[in-house]
Image (cartoon, rainbow, N blue to C red):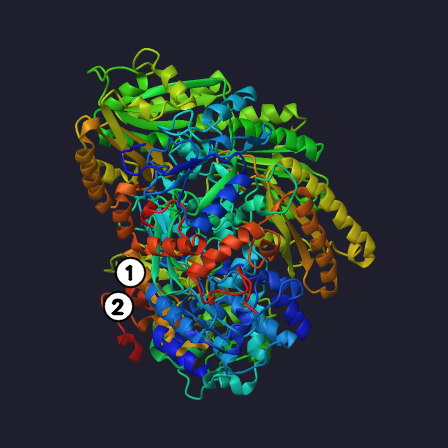
């Protein structure tokens, strides 16, 4: 992107401030009518307009990169609310594109250390645990096995045997034939590459993924991690549909009834990369309904959902700030009266664990599904 | 400054004092300076920005600034439209940002909503809607703005309800302000713990001191606003006229009978105002561009079913007598969405509309000229002659006129709601240009048009709004300004509150 | 001139006939340090026109009484302080317009003085207290001042557009009791005289019911005038004895319009609400009651409505919330009259209970007035324009407001010549 292109885009924002608030008609507490984790916590230049000012200043030469600018840039969770709201009816400021460009052009030395190593996220770890899946009949498509639909093994899954076991159990229980690149895994790409300004690495990895999908004639890819789902949907040119694992669960619930879970009313966090980025709002709700749970929606939900605070690499860059961001959301959880917060994103899950009120629970939708179908955890060892 | 920063950090916490280059850059400009790139309105950087968390902290900062003779400026919600929050000079002052103060409480008995300066109109509306007890606030302007932005509080008008509810200033019931001395002043409904929601008194009303003073008399830390009944029903009417003159005559008749709760007469080239609350503003904007010669009256009704039906019918009769033609349904559909405004809820498309005029999004409105007229006749005259002045500048600058997309568009309105409390006939007009930001070379032409409009205002008889740093208040209204300066001297003898904004910088 | 509130007689009265003479008088008073008391018509219910100090000169403005400009089309008039309601209404009548009048301010009262002192207008529930547009006059130091378009050097008679941060200054001169200067000209708004007018009555058992009814009816935004009166006040309005036939409290609703159909829908809407409130609307509470109310609103009688021979009347001019009215009603005498008018859609009320006393009992009555006022004040009831008897107490209660007002007063009136002793300044 040239400086002029960046400027043209940044100037779309006229600082009207509407993206600082949600658009639903009513809220019970003015604290729940705010948006943008960094803006609503740190204000001023930490609001979307402030970030657009960085772009404007850099493009025009009014500002020079320094650590203050970097601090603001890396306080943003890239949740996409401002971009989505603006394109829904304001001035079409392509905020996400601008922010991603800024993360690309920021001098390397100003990048937080955790993000400097972002490219490593795309590498397959030597000690991956994907073999667990074989215990549940998942076909390894890296060898001679074939399957139309595969599970995408992302960074959060690839070395996580207990989560792999839960998913494997669910696949087996559903009776569906599913594959995975097990012995020669695909690059476990996800949003982290964008957070670190490594979009070129991401694009190269996705091109590799595309080639292998084509070679194996894969018709559909199921993603557990929304941050992988969203980047694959955006960058893949394969034409293969990428879907959230929650869709798989929703279908399963229609065919096979689970046992009743002993849970009072629950609420649900729309992960930014599942909702706003991948437009998947209904499947997780179908799953919650299918599990027979009473869902008490938060006021900021679906495309108005408030980011948990972990996005943009925040959990690694500044976990303390990520925890601060989560605090407002926990208040909203309490206000619904629900005691359990359900989410379908490993990062939301991890961040919400920080600062979780004692009387509240946080549950991953996958774990909940596994429980409902009788998964005990002992299966993992088998 | 380093020592001062340390002291400020001690007051508000180290996180809440910022002096970095981005902070200074961000607080040095607003929409007006932004789109004009400083050519029409200057950008001035603050030395530091502080984010107080309470009136107590505001007091302490004021006391410090007074001792150290540092000018203070204030910004409400951070959406600044009209230069009121930009320091009077580069690198001389400290800016208050009130984002940490967003508390909103509603008192059903006294029927007021109390808000801190960081709260936005949208937040108040959302809270009141959830409470749903038959009453609502009334604000104009864009939903993201602080209630304390002078634009919002003073001229903030809702084009579909303002005829009855007036403007922002009519809603103020009381306020809490920290004076230059560091003392706290509570007026009107906040003067006593149980004061009724009444702004006037006791004695001469001090509630109105902060309006348009842009922090020149003191720093407001809380305000109370009155509430209005939520109507049972709302309705609207859009009528076109062959000439602006016939529309104005018809409007007079409606005003005389005091029908409708909001009404706006829109002349050729400026019926964009009809999109103010439209849901389909994008289609509308294209439509407006294609039909520049339309004269239009848009009005709304509210109240009981019978009231809405009666007034609408009566207005159709009146307007048709003056050659008005009721807009067909398919056209009205483009304007759908104004019901929320007619009911008095805040709903404003201004930021959106500004972005659509040149077909790209990097355009914005420059507030060129605006003011209050006392009659529609004067407004009509202003519109007519203003348009000619505008066209002349275009003819003199062919590249300006014949730019491939309609780069510059006159967006003048014939607002009929400003000073219309209870159907009074005062009118308001504003002229806003939508300019392609990237075309810096067009700014002198906009400046030339602005100068002509300013001269016209004097000639025709119109008072400047006095928004932001409108120097005409100082130079053209000495009999008013000298009294304002007396108050200023009594309230802020050292003159460290917002010098160079509503009051001139001392040389 | 002895009044309920003040014992001082003016030393002298001057009668200017033009604004220029007013300025001359102020300048002269500054040089001789003579206290000035501006009087427009002398009908102010709080006696702000009577001196609170010895040796004062009354500036009688009743001869500065031109209607400078009358704009029937835009429904505005530019008037001088001596213009009376009767005078302006006569002009309005010829043009199909009407003047907004005030509760208990007589037809011969000054329009400008009444509006400036914010005496409660019958039209406030509908039109809110913004009846004045721009103004012009002289500050206490003799310098000219003006607001809005009147502050601009434009040579035209029709300068009534607000603009230029008018409120800071204009509203400071409201309820100032002449302490900051003398206004010599103001633009005021006029309303249309409607051909169809009707008064409806809603009888209530007690004050709480009346207040509740006021809040309910005003929410329709269909009324031109609305207030509630107790039996004593109503009897006086109707020129009758307070007989048992009149209800303890009555809400008076005035509906106006241009067509019969307009009044019909309003009557129906209001009738439905009356039913919800458990009552009924009555058109004739007594003979010609409606006509009498309309006549009083058009050209009010003034305080004389309540005086009868030796029996004198003094109002408590307050703004109160519904619960304050309820709490304070018990403090009043049995023979007190009272009128309540909803403001801010019923968020607060103009509440004017009164004291009745025999003219021989002035001192006792003053004590009682101060005692009751003190109790109301403590409860947070606002006395927007305090009389001299309670001004100091009020200034002490609202010390932050009055501290700033005092420094403004000192800056604008260094010789303290404008109505000294008022407002606790």
Q: Which mark is residue A334?
A: 1
**Residue B44 can be seen, yes or no:** yes
Within 10 Å of disc 2 (Cα), the crowding (few <14, some 14-19, many 20+) is: some
Residue A80: x, y in percent?
Answer: 50, 65
Of residues B178 and A347, which is closer to you in this image?
B178
Q: Cβ–Cβ below 8 Å for labels 2 and 1? A: yes
Along the horizontal axis of the image, is B330 left or right of C138?
Answer: right
- If the image is split into quadrants, where does the N terminus of chain C sit? top left
| Marks 2 and 1, the one that precedes in the sequence | 1
Of residues A278 and C261, which is closer to you in this image?
C261
> Is the same chain shared between marks 2 and 1?
yes
Chain of the residue where label 1 is placed in the rendered structure:
A
Image point 34% across, 56% down: which residue?
C403
Along the horizontal axis of the image, is C290 left or right of B254?
Answer: left
Marks 2 and 1 sit apart, C-alpha to C-alpha, by: 9 Å
Residue C167: x, y in percent?
Answer: 48, 48
Of residues B132 and C206, which is closer to you in this image?
C206
Residue wearing tag 2: A357
Residue C302: x, y in percent?
Answer: 35, 25
Image point 70% across, 54% down: which residue?
B451
**Residue B160 can be seen, yes or no:** no
Q: Secondary structure at mark 1?
A: helix
- The quarter holding residue C254 reads top left
Residue B265: x, y in percent?
Answer: 62, 37
């Amino acid at each position: 992107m040239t400086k002029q292109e960046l400027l043209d885009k940044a100037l779309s924002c006229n600082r009207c401030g509407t993206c600082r608030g949600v658009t639903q008609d009513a809220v019970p507490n003015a604290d729940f009518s705010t948006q943008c984790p960094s803006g609503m916590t740190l204000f001023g230049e930490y609001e979307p307009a402030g970030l657009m000012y960085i772009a404007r200043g850099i493009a025009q030469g009014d500002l020079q990169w320094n650590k203050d600018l970097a601090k603001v840039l890396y306080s943003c969770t890239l949740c996409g609310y401002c971009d989505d709201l603006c394109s829904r009816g304001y001035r079409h400021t392509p905020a996400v594109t601008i922010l991603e460009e800024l993360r690309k052009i920021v001098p390397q030395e100003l990048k937080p250390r955790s993000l400097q190593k972002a490219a490593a996220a795309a590498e397959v770890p030597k000690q991956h645990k994907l073999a667990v899946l074989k215990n549940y009949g998942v076909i390894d498509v890296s060898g001679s096995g074939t399957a139309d639909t595969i599970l995408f093994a992302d960074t959060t899954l690839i070395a996580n045997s207990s989560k792999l076991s839960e998913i494997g159990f669910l696949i087996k229980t559903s009776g569906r034939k599913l594959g995975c690149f097990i012995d020669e895994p695909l690059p476990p790409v996800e949003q982290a590459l964008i957070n670190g300004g490594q979009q070129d690495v991401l694009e190269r990895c996705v091109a590799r993924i595309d080639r292998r999908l084509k070679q194996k004639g894969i018709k559909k890819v199921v993603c557990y991690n929304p941050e992988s789902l969203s980047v694959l949907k955006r960058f893949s040119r394969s034409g293969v549909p990428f879907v959230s694992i929650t869709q798989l669960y929703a279908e399963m619930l229609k065919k096979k009834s689970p046992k009743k879970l002993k849970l009072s009313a629950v609420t649900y966090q729309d992960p930014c990369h599942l909702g706003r980025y991948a437009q998947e709002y209904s499947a997780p709700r179908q799953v919650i309904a299918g599990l027979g749970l009473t869902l008490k929606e938060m006021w900021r939900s679906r495309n108005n959902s408030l980011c948990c605070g972990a996005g943009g690499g925040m959990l690694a860059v500044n976990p303390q700030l990520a925890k601060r961001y989560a605090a407002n959301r926990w208040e909203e959880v309490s206000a619904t009266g629900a005691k359990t917060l359900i989410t379908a994103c490993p990062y939301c899950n991890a961040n919400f664990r920080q600062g979780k009120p004692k009387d509240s629970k946080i549950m991953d939708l996958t774990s909940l599904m596994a429980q409902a179908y009788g998964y005990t955890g002992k299966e993992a060892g088998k | 400054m380093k020592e001062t920063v340390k002291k400020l950090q001690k007051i508000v916490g180290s996180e809440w004092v910022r002096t970095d280059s981005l902070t200074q850059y961000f607080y040095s400009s607003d929409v007006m300076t932004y789109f004009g790139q400083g050519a029409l309105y200057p950008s001035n950087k603050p030395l530091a920005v502080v984010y107080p968390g309470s009136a107590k902290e505001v007091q302490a900062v004021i006391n410090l600034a007074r001792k150290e003779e540092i000018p203070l400026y204030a910004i409400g919600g951070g959406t600044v439209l009209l230069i009121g929050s930009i320091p009077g000079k580069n690198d001389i002052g400290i800016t208050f940002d009130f984002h940490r103060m967003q508390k909103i409480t509603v008192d059903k008995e006294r029927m007021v909503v109390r808000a801190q300066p960081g709260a936005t109109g949208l937040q108040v509306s959302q809270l009141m809607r959830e409470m749903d007890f038959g009453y609502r606030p009334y604000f104009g302007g864009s939903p993201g703005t602080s209630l304390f932005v002078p634009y919002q509080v003073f001229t903030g008008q809702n084009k579909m309800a303002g005829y009855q509810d007036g403007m922002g200033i009519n809603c103020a019931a009381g306020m809490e302000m920290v004076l230059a001395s560091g003392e706290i002043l509570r007026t009107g409904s906040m003067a006593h713990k149980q004061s009724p929601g009444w702004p006037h008194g006791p004695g001469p009303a001090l509630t109105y001191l902060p309006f348009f003073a842009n922090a020149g008399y003191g720093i407001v830390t809380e305000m109370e606003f009155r509430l209005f009944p939520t109507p049972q029903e709302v309705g609207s009417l859009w009528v076109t006229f062959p000439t602006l003159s016939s529309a104005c005559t018809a409007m007079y008749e409606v005003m005389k009978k005091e029908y409708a709760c909001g009404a706006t007469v829109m002349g050729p080239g400026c019926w964009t105002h009809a999109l103010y609350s439209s849901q389909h503003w994008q289609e509308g904007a294209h439509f407006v561009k294609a039909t520049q010669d339309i004269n239009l009256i848009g009005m709304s009704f509210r109240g009981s079913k019978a009231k809405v039906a009666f007034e609408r019918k009566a207005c159709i009769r009146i307007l048709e007598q003056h050659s008005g033609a009721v807009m067909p349904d398919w056209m009205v559909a483009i304007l759908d969405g104004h019901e929320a405004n007619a009911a008095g809820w805040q709903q404003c498309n201004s930021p959106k509309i500004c972005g659509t005029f040149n077909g790209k999004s990097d355009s914005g409105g420059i507030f060129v000229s605006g003011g209050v007229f006392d009659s529609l006749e004067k407004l009509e005259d202003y519109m007519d002659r203003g348009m000619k002045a505008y066209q002349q500048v275009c003819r003199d600058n062919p590249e300006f006129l014949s730019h491939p997309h309609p780069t510059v568009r006159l967006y003048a309105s014939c607002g009929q709601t400003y000073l219309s409390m209870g159907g009074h006939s005062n009118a308001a007009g504003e002229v806003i240009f939508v300019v392609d930001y990237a075309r810096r070379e067009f700014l002198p032409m906009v400046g030339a048009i602005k100068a002509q409009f300013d001269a016209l205002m004097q000639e025709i008889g119109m008072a400047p709004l006095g928004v932001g740093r409108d120097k005409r208040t100082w130079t053209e209204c000495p009999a008013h300004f000298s009294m304002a300066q007396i108050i200023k001297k009594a309230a802020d003898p050292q003159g460290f509150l917002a010098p160079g904004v509503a009051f001139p910088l001392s040389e | 001139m002895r009044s309920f509130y003040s014992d001082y007689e003016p030393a002298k009265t001057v009668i200017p006939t033009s604004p220029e003479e007013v300025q001359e008088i102020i300048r002269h008073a500054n040089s001789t340090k003579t206290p000035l008391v501006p009087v427009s018509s002398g009908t102010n219910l709080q006696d702000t026109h009577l001196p609170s100090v010895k040796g004062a000169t009354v500036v009688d403005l009743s001869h500065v009484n031109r209607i400078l400009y009358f704009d029937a089309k835009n429904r505005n008039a530019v008037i001088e302080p001596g213009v009376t309601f009767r005078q302006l209404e006569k002009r309005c009548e010829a043009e199909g317009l009407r003047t907004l009048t005030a509760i208990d301010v007589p037809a011969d009262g000054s329009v400008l003085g009444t509006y400036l002192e914010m005496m409660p207008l019958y039209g406030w529930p509908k039109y809110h207290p913004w009846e004045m547009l721009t103004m012009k006059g002289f500050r206490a130091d003799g310098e000219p001042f003006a607001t809005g378009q009147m502050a601009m050097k434009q040579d035209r008679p029709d300068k009534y557009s607000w603009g230029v941060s008018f409120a800071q200054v204009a509203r400071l001169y409201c309820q100032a009791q002449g302490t900051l200067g003398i206004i010599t000209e103001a633009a005021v708004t006029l309303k249309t005289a409607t051909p169809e007018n009707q008064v409806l009555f809603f009888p209530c058992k007690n004050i709480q019911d009346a207040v509740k009814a006021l809040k309910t009816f005003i929410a329709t935004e269909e009324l031109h005038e609305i207030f509630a009166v107790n039996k004593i006040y109503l009897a006086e309005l109707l020129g009758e004895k307070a007989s048992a036939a009149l209800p303890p409290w009555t809400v008076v609703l005035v509906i106006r319009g241009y067509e019969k159909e307009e009044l019909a829908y309003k009557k129906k809407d209001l009738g439905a609400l009356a039913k919800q409130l458990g009552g009924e609307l009555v058109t004739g509470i007594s003979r010609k009651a409606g006509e009498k109310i309309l006549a009083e609103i058009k050209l009010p009688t003034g305080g004389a409505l309540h005086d009868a021979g030796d029996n004198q009347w003094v109002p408590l001019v307050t703004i109160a919330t519904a619960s304050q009215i309820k709490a304070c009603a018990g403090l009043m005498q049995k023979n007190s009259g009272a009128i309540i008018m909803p403001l801010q859609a019923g968020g607060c009320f103009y509440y004017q209970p009164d004291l009745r006393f025999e003219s021989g009992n002035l001192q006792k009555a003053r004590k009682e007035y101060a005692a009751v006022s003190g109790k109301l004040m403590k409860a947070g009831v606002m006395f927007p324009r305090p009389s001299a008897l309670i001004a100091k107490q009020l200034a002490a209660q609202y010390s932050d407001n009055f501290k700033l007002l005092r420094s403004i007063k000192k800056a604008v009136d260094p010789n303290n010549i404008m109505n000294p002793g008022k407002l606790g300044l």
